[in-house]
Image (cartoon, rainbow, N blue to C red):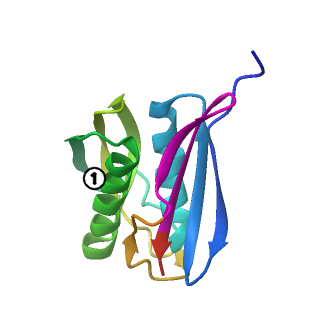
Amino acid sequence: MGARMEPAYELFDHTADLGVRVTAATLPELVPPAVAGLYATLGHIVPQPAPAPADDFAFDATGDDPAVLLRDLLAELLHHFDTRRRVLMDIAVGEFSGVRLAVTGRLRPLDPEQSAPAREVKAVTYHALAVRPVAGGYEATFIVDI
């Protein structure tokens, strides 16, 4: 076996949209860079540091497609950002399998002085949505509508 793949994300251009490709050694390790990738599509996003108030966050969904489960998590986080200007921190992945995604964390307010939103993200789409095994781990791809 080769070297262990480190969790990472990269942004790539997509016609009228913006794509995110995430890599990690395991399915659960895909989640934090996917969340970071989502926030990166919005621009430079910084949450307020503690002791700023934070809300508990829990996401627990089942289904038969891990890509759809990941997309549903990201769509919920985008909703929290759009409606409440909250950013997920302290991410803990309880399970990410082919049938369940369970994530907890803390939603912190956006720091308006440190953040520089660059674009409006309207949705996390189903277009080109995928989670697949690759050499050394897994890759997830999602497209955001901007």
Residue found at x 42% / y 60%: 48
Q: Residue at x 39, y 40 (%)?
A: 91
Q: Is residue 50 magenta?
A: no
Question: Quarter of the image holding residue 123?
Answer: bottom left
The quadrant holding residue 66 is top left
Q: Position of residue 100 (x, y in %)?
A: 27, 34
The span shown in magenta is 128-143
Q: Position of residue 118 (x, y in %)?
A: 56, 81
Crowding near pointer 1: few (<14 within 10 Å), some, many (20+)? some
Q: Nearer the viewer, residue 38 or 69?
A: 69
Q: Residue at x 45, y 75 (%)?
A: 112
Q: Which quadrant would the N terminus be assigned to in this image?
A: top right
The residue that mark 1 highlights is 54
Q: Is residue 134 magenta?
A: yes
> Mark 1: which secondary structure?
loop
In percent of width and height, residue 28 lies at 45, 32
Reply above or below: 62 against 47. Answer: above
Residue sitting nearer the eye, 46 or 71: 71
> Which amino acid, by three-letter code, is at mark 1?
Ala
Residue 17 percent coordinates (x, y): 54, 78
